[in-house]
Structure formats: C-alpha cells, structure tokens
Amino acid sequence: MRRKSFSASLFTPHPSLFTGCAYCILPRVADHYDMQEILSRVKAAFIGLAVGDALGAPVEFLTAHEIKAKYGRLEEIVGGGWLRLKAGQVTDDTEMSLCVARAIVAAGGWDLQGIAGRFAAWLKTKPIDVGDTCRKGIRNYMLKGELETPFNQWDAGNGAVMRLLPVALFTMGDDALLEKYAVAQAHLTHNHPLSDAACVYFGRLVHLAVLGFSKARMRRELEGLITEYPNFRFDPYRGLSTGYVVDTMQTVFHYFFKARDFEECLVGTVNQGGDADTTGAIAGALAGAYYGMENIPKRWIRKMDRKVMEDVVTLAERLITMSPTGMKGR
Ligand SMILES: [Mg+2]
C-alpha cells in the first residue's frame, strides 16, 4: 500500500483540528480520505486477526526455544498444537470477536446485552478454548444477568483486548465513543485498569492505522499509555509473551513497530511463543489495519476457513459503515 503518498496527497490535517482529542476529526474531514483504502484496511484488520490466531495457536504455550527446536522458524499455518487444530482453524480470539461484531451488526448499534448474550450462547457450544477469566465473567452474566464483572486484581489478562477490534471499527472516528464502549465490553469479563488501558490504546492504534497515519504517529500515541502505566514500556523488549496483558501488548508493540510488513510482524510475534494465538490475533489486527489487504500473504489466506473469512469481511464492512466516519451511504 502506498501509505506515504496516500497520507501526503489525501490527508492534510489543519493544526487546529488536533486540539483536544488527537484525531476525533473525521466527520469534518471524511471527504479527504480514500474510502477504498480505508475499506481495504478495515477488512485486512479483521482478516489479520483471524490469520494471526490460526498462525499462532499451534505454538501456544511453547517457548521461543521450543518453537525453534520444532519448526526452525514457524512461517506457515500448520495446525496441531495442544488444541489439535486443523490448519487454518481459529480459536476463542476470533470467535469472541465475531460475537461482538455480530451483536453490534444485528442490533444496528451498540448492544452490550447482545454481546453478553452471544458470549453465553458461544460458551454453551463448548468451544475448544476459553480463558478462565472469560468463562468466569460469562457465567457471572448467565447466573446473575450482570453486565459488569467486579474488579479483580487477577483480571489483568489479555481476554478483553483480544476481542476489541470490532469495537474499534464500530467507533472509528470518535475517540470518546471508543473509550466508553471499549471499557464496557472489557468489563463483561475483565475489570482491571491495565486491561482497560490496553483496550483503549489498542483501539486508538487501530483507528490511526485505518485512517492512514504513520507508525511514528502511532508510536507517539503510546506515550500516553506508557506515561500512565510505565509497565507497558516495550523498549527494551523483555521477551515475555504470556497471557498477562502487559506482556501481550509489549510483544505486539515490539514486533509491530520493528517489522516492515505484515508477514514479518506476525512471524516475529508468534515465534515468541507463550500466548501465541492471542498475541498473533492482536498483532494481526493491528498490522492488517496498517498494511491493508494486499500485504497479507495469500498463502495464509488460502489456508483459512472460508466461512470465517467471508464472515469477517462482511462484518468489517458493516461495522465501518455504522461508525461515525461518515461512510454511511457511500
Ligand atoms: Mg485463543
């Protein structure tokens, strides 16, 4: 994708637009964006999430050293792993994201109850993989009808941010809306400031990437996160990629900013091991949003479950159409 020329030729923000919120300016400048490029990035973000999940899941819980011994460098979607997956099969990261997306699309707008209901229906299908915190939160909803799980110091896992992408797409162009809905959806299962911060800032990066901003601008955005929560500092990279949301986001940030394309970002991320399906899914969403469709390796897309690919593309288009970007009717 010709990001440089795109940014230079199609978007020249007026400095006054950046006062207050950094970029909630879309309704006024939507005509300056190339909507086809935005659509490409939006679809690539959701496809990237599923691809990263499928690429990383076979090496979930392995260390980087174990992956090296077994695969050399994992560069293909191979299936297997502790879940004995078919090549291209996705896990809870993609499935829960689909629940969020379908609930919003079905309701024609924000519907937290609908999201919780779809999580509950999904849990009843006995999915191959569910995080403990997600299971606990969903059961809390099923038993008590509560849409917010109580604060818990152990809830700083990555289960809320792994399914945040549809919220980022639906709120594209409105930072306040992103913050409100990102935290609301997170609190269905995870109620912890570090998880909340990861969700909001991951959403902001997705917004910036989809709208064509540079990596330097995205990196600057993260300064806010690191100032507030220095734990998220990722340079120097500590090489941890557990399910703790701080480790997860450090891994995603490190490989996203270091890599030169989608494949390099994803391969680096999943070969770190640990919670590799989730780091892969989050990195895939971010790299997809940044690089667009043509940068996702075709050989990976061919391996994916076709129905999942069709669903994520359709839902991504619907979500961006419903967002405040002013794309309605285009
Ligand atoms: Mg998973």
Image (cartoon, rainbow, N blue to C red):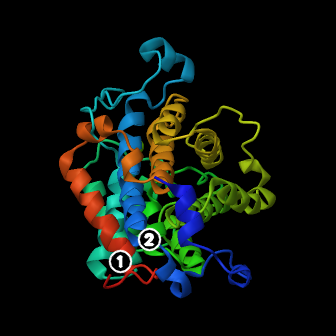
Q: Secondary structure at mark 1?
A: helix
Kind of residue at badge 1: Thr
Label at residue 35: none
In the image, is residue 280 above or below residue 199? Answer: above
In the image, is residue 138 above or below residue 1? Answer: below
Residue visible at 37% across and 48% down? 294
**Coordinates of residue 193 in the picture (x, y in percent):** 67, 62
Q: Answer few, some or many: residues within 10 Å of disc 2's Cα (few below 14, many 20 plus, some between 14 and 19).
A: some
Question: Would residue 142 be visible to someone looking at this image?
Answer: no
Residue visible at 49% across and 33% down? 270
From the viewer's perspective, is 301 left or right of 167?
A: left
From the viewer's perspective, is 80 left or right of 72?
A: left
Q: Which residue is mark 2?
A: 34
Q: Answer few, some or many: residues within 10 Å of disc 1's Cα (few below 14, many 20 plus, some between 14 and 19).
A: some
Residue visible at 65% across and 47% down? 246
From the viewer's perspective, is 71 left or right of 20?
A: left
Q: Which residue is mark 1?
A: 321
